[in-house]
Amino acid sequence: MYTVAALYHFTTFADPAAIRGPLLAVAEENAIRGTLLLAREGINGTIAGSRKGIDAILSHIRSLPGCAELEWKESTASSAPFPRLKVRLKREIVTMGKPDVDPRATVGHYLNPEEWNELISAPDVAVIDTRNDYEVAIGTFKGAVDPLTKTFREFPEWWEQNKERFHNKRIAMFCTGGIRCEKSTNWLLQQGVPEVFHLKGGILKYLEEMPAEESLWEGECFVFDGRVSVGHGLKEGPHHLCHACRRPVLPADMGRSEWEEGVSCHHCIDETTEADKTRFRERQKQIALAKARGERHLAGED
């Protein structure tokens, strides 16, 4: 059983590149896999490993400048959810493309799962899902608005085009782990929205703590690792990943005529050319050959 830790923390790193080397070394020493992103605004990532290994890397992260109060969310996976370790330097730890957005200055009001249920049931509240369209497609909160954005960078433009829909509404926002809402709530406050709320710890914390019989969540939550989705109690969900388009599919979808492993699914069958599909088939062939030899092929796991 692998321990999975999802984390982020906004702080000021004067020199993220100087932090990367020691962080990478500790992660490698403890056989940690997953992705950690470093930027001047802080750290973000999801990692997996043994209980001892996760404790060691979290201890190191908490020792970084301004990270003593780091919070994270834990779950488990029955098989390795990541094929490799990546520690990368970025301009932003979650890309919104708005340099004036600063969650360290101000954010919306945090709500725990019980408070969240009460708020989003109120008639004067608009609930907005800040995740990408393929994430929303497999699960969201009852009655939530789906902006149909393909990336978080599109959210400010979507808000500008749709803000009149939410006149005189209190705004409640949520995302997978909470990091997008740190930026999106700061953005809305800058735009003059007076009352903005967000779910502390995101969907993952809600599914961990909220009993299914009291839940307002519908479906599964997409996660960016080998589990693909999780449900209440953070139990692994039924979804698989189409390795052509990176969208989640259900086992029933894999029986459809559009499904060809590693090549296409019903979401992307018409989005790629025959040349693309030929390339994907060759990649899938190499993955199968590596598997037959008892070897790992990272293209098939990553």
Image (spheres, rainbow, N blue to C red):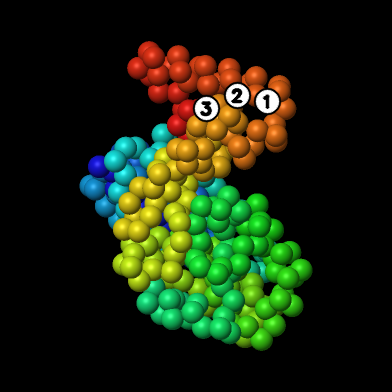
Work out whether residue 34 can be spotted. no
- N-terminal of the pair, mark 2 or mark 3, is 3
Element carrying mark 3: loop
Label 1 sits on residue: 276
Numbered badge on residue 261:
3
Q: Taking 222 as reference, is 201 above or below it? A: below
Residue 259 locus on image (x, y percent): 56, 30
Comparing labels 1 and 3, the label whose residue is closer to the camera: 3
Residue 112 locus on image (x, y percent): 39, 75
Q: Amino acid at mark 1?
A: Asp
CB-based contact (under 8 Å), mark 2 and mark 1? yes
Image quadrant assignment for residue 68? bottom left
Residue drawn at x 39%, y 14% is 292
Number of residues whose C-alpha sits closer than 10 Å to that of mark 2, classed few (under 14), some (14–19) or many (20 or more)? some
Residue drawn at x 35%, y 17% is 294
Residue drawn at x 59%, y 54% is 132
